[in-house]
Amino acid sequence: KNEVEQSPQNLTAQEGEFITINCSYSVGISALHWLQQHPGGGIVSLFMLSSGKKKHGRLIATINIQEKHSSLHITASHPRDSAVYICAVPNSRGGSNYKLTFGKGTLLTVNP
Amino acid sequence: GAVVSQHPSWVICKSGTSVKIECRSLDFQATTMFWYRQFPKQSLMLMATSNEGSKATYEQGVEKDKFLINHASLTLSTLTVTSAHPEDSSFYICSARTGSGANVLTFGAGSRLTVL
């Protein structure tokens, strides 16, 4: 089973700061997911990426397959970005990308 | 975009009763849906894979007789927590594949179950 480690567990930032959240995993994969979970619990899929970098608005996700590491960046952070950010990977090498192992999440709080 | 609707969003029930949670894909057909559970301050954990027209595949440690999954149509999967106990209190979330062959998952908003 793939082991997923996220850091930091908690992150507090001031509005406007650049945010970085990291994710490392133990078993080689073909794709990695970044998810956002708001206080009410609902989950939104932010990115699925298999190589390089993806950008959506102020969010940027990068992945290094060789190093088994991904980062999620938020530029010009805003209080509405406050949420739990979760990294998820397939739970075994060659396994379906749908059976995911989730990190414990990073709780981001952006203060005005 | 693809939407997965989950209902109810929260439910409180007495110990010993059964609770049904629905997961619907609103604008696409989902041959496969996934059910997850999340305890406070814990990671999401996959409980089972729900396949339309066939039996669900349960993850190790998940009691199939306690967590009944039915996926009778391409747009609806249900999870029934039978004879619920306080330790079943948790946040339950479903997700569905969006598009054939795609690795994109769309998640429901989740259902918070509290068993008294």
Image: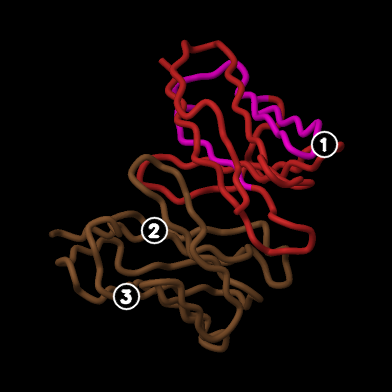
Chain colours: A brown, B red
Answer with left or right where residue B66 lies relative to residue A110.
right
User: Disc 1 marks which residue?
Assistant: B55
Label 2 close to label 1 by CB (< 8 Å): no
As for residue B93 lying within the magenta part, the answer is yes
Location of residue A48 (image quadrant):
bottom right
Residue A82 vertical placement versus A8 (above, below): above
> Which chain does the residue under circle 2 lie in?
A
**Residue at 54% over, 86% down:** A52
Report the mark closest to the observer, 3 or 2: 3
* Residue annotated with mark 3: A20
In this view, the residue farthest toward the right is B53
| Number of other residues with Cα within 10 Å of mark 3, as a class: few under 14, some 14 to 19, many 20 or more | some
The amino acid beneath tag 3 is: Thr
Q: Is residue B52 placed above or below A15 in the rendered structure? A: above
In this rendering, the count of numbered labels is 3
Q: Residue B62's spot in the image, x, y percent?
A: 64, 37
The residues bearing labels 3 and 2 have C-alpha atoms spaced at a distance of 13 Å
Which chain is indicated by disc 3? Answer: A
SS class, disc 2: loop
Which of B46/B28 is in front? B28
